[in-house]
Structure formats: C-alpha cells, structure tokens
Image: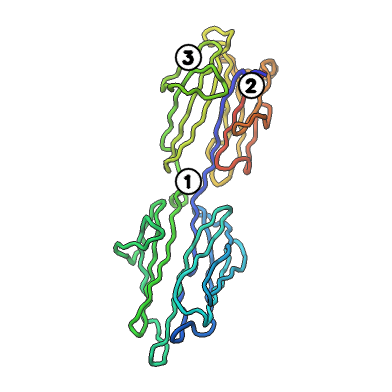
C-alpha cells in the first residue's frame, strides 16, 4: 500500500528524582584498649522517596570488614539493617549500603568508630557530639569550605556532606562523614519542564526519511506529490531535548493544495506524563483539503495504521490507539499513516 498521509506524535514519561534516607549513618562502638568490647549492634532503617512520595526499596549485598556484619531484614517498603560488631573489629571505618529502587542503585555511606579505653583502665565516655553540614559538587572528596551547623539547601546534582565530630572525656575525638546527592532530574520532587520549543519546515520527495537539507522557520509549500516535513525540537530545563517530525503530502491531482490529504494525531490527555502514570487515547484525524473525512469517505481513502518507535510492522489499525502504563518507557514515538 502507498502512504497517502502521515504524522508523528511523541509521548514522554518523566520521573521525579529519588532521595534515600538512613535513620542512622554513623555509630560509635565502646572498645577495649585495642578493639570493640564484646559484641555490639545498632539498627538502620532505610527509606526512599520519589519527589515527596514514598517508594519501596530493597538492600543489595553489603561488604564489610572482618569483625563487622550488616544484614537486612528484607522487609518493604522500609527495610531495616542490623549492624553487628565483634572484638575482631579493631579500627574505625565506613561501609556502603546499596539501596535498590527498581533498576536504580544508590549507595549510602555509613561511618563507625571505636571509643577505646584510656590507659588508666577505664573506658572513656562521650563528652560532646557536634554535627555540621556543607554542600559540594563532589561526592568523593571531602569539601574544605566552612562547615555550618545549619542545614544548607542544595541544587539539583549537588552533594550534601554531613560531618560528625565526637569528643571523648580523654580529650580525643573522632570525625565521621556521610554524603547524599540531590537528584539531577527533579527539584523538590518536581519534574523537569519545557524551556523552549522550536518548529522548522522543509519540503522533500520522501515521506519516510527526514530530509537533510536546510530547515526553514517559515512554513514552506511543497510541489504536487511532495511531502512537507515539520520538525519540532523541545528543550527541557535539564538541558536535554527531544525531536519529533510530522509529515503531510500534497495531492498529485489537487489544485493549490485544496485536495491534499493530511493526517493529524491528537492525545486526549497530553503528551507529557509523570512517574509512569500514563493513560491517554491517540486519535487520528484525516483531512482532504479543509474537510475532515469520516465513515465511508475515510474508508474509501484507505486504512489508518499506527507504528511505534520506527517499527516496520503496524501494532494497531483504526482511528484511535489507547496508551496505558507500561506501554512506553521514558519516551515513545507513534507514527500514524493513511495507507491505500
């Protein structure tokens, strides 16, 4: 069958940024003169948010040094990790908890230290605990600017460092750091937004391959039998962009385009969705000149077919196509063609 008219519509699914929180990201074990005293445990509850909505998460395999173990209870949506130290643990340090949300893994660092006994045979005690904060563009190098006791606001992509200084009765102290990252594809749980839309036009002899010549910002008139391509570039606030094409064909037997066949695709619920909450119906409208064709007049022209993401085989026929959650991931391009 020949393609009489064609157009494309893009559907986009945006996802809020993920944030992971630990109920406890540093701990001090009581010690002897050179190791942890006996067996000691503490618990960490893990929770995850997508924007402001709590989502289920799980914990992957945690690597710890000799004398220390970290085991998840496997519960959802907020698993609890039990950390156990024995006398085999002789040095302070840290370990990473791999928090799994769907197909994303976010590492959260937990620091621990040992309060050793003093030389007089008595255990030192904690005399002070100071927590300060600092934001940074690095998640691996401890920042060197001024630390603040107030929690600073972080921008998308920045890291929030927390420094905990524990001072003991013998005058010694330990310093532990933890770091979390603000998601890059959302701010305070909001999706990225459209910052610019640019539309350009070009005539071509092909109705299947986008032309490579110069695009015009002003509409162009194609000759009889030619295709007129419309390119729409949408730029988003995170710097990314999408490109979609619409195609119309000038009828070979028409006069001044009055009898040209064109097709338009309309989404009943918009084209941008959030967090896979996708529910819309695409409807094709076919026009001959300025008159929309329906019923037997439309059937006489041919069959309407829908193609997804450049597929050569149609996945549906008819004037409507229903799109539901799970039908696309992040982005889907649907081409509708009048073939006859």
Image height of 131 relative to 247, above or below: below
Q: Viewer-nearest of labels 3 and 1?
A: 3
- Residue 131: x and y in percent read 37, 70
- Label number found at residue 102: none
Instruction: Give me the C-alpha separation between circle 2 and circle 1.
Output: 35 Å
> Looking at the image, is 204 positioned above or below residue 57?
above
Which residue is at a point 59% across and 15% down the rendered structure image?
288
Q: Which mark is residue 338?
A: 2
Q: How far apart are marks 3 and 1 (CA)?
A: 38 Å
Figure quadrant of the C terminus: top right
Q: Measuring 67% from the left and 32% from the top, which residue is drawn there?
A: 315
Among the two numbered marks 3 and 1 on one chain, the one whose residue lies closer to the N terminus:
1
Residue at position x 38%, y 73% in the image? 175
State which tag comes first along the sequence, 2 or 3. Answer: 3
Q: Residues within 10 Å of mark 1 (few under 14, many from 20)?
A: many
Of helix, strand and loop, which one carries label 1? loop
Task: Give the residue number, with chain letter if any, for mark 1.
Answer: 191
Residue beneath the point at 65% across and 29% down: 312
Instruction: Tell which residue pokes out farthest to the bottom in this image.
Output: 120
- Mark 2, residues whose alpha carbon is within 10 Å: few (<14), some, or many (≥20)? many
From the viewer's side, name the closer residue of 195 and 177.
177
Q: Is mark 3 on a helix, strand or loop?
A: loop
Place of residue 40 in the rendered image (x, y in percent of width and height, measured from the top left): 53, 80
- As drawn, the residue found furthest toward the left would be 146
Q: Name the residue under label 3.
A: 221
């Amino acid at each position: 069958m020949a393609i009489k008219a064609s157009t494309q519509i893009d559907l986009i699914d945006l996802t809020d940024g993920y944030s992971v929180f630990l109920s406890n990201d540093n701990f001090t074990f009581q010690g002897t003169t050179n190791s942890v005293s006996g067996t000691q445990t503490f618990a960490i509850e893990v929770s995850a948010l997508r924007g402001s909505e709590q989502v289920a998460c799980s914990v992957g395999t945690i690597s710890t040094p000799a004398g220390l173990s970290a085991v998840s209870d496997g519960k959802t949506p907020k698993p609890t990790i039990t950390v156990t130290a024995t006398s085999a643990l002789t040095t302070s340090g840290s370990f990473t908890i791999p928090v799994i949300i769907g197909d994303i893994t976010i590492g959260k660092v937990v620091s621990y230290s040992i309060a050793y006994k003093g030389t007089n045979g008595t255990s030192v005690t904690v005399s002070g605990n100071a927590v300060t904060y600092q934001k940074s563009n690095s998640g691996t190098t401890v920042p060197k600017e001024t630390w603040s006791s107030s929690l600073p606001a972080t921008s998308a992509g920045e890291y929030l460092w927390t420094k905990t200084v524990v001072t003991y009765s013998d005058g010694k102290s330990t310093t532990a750091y933890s770091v979390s990252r603000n998601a890059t594809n959302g701010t305070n749980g909001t999706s990225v937004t459209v910052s610019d839309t640019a539309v350009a036009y070009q005539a071509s002899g092909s109705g299947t391959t986008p032309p490579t010549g110069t695009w015009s910002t002003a509409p162009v008139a194609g000759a009889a039998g030619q295709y007129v391509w419309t390119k729409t570039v949408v730029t988003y606030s995170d710097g990314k962009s999408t490109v979609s094409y619409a195609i119309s064909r000038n009828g070979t037997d028409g006069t001044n385009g009055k009898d040209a066949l064109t097709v338009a695709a309309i989404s009943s619920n918009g084209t941008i969705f959030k967090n896979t909450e996708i529910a819309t119906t695409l409807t094709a409208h076919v026009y001959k000149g300025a008159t929309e064709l329906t019923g037997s007049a439309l059937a006489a022209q041919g069959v309407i077919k829908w193609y997804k993401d450049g597929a050569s085989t149609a996945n549906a026929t008819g004037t409507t196509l229903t799109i539901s959650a799970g039908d696309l991931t992040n982005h889907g391009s649907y081409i509708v063609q009048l073939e006859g």
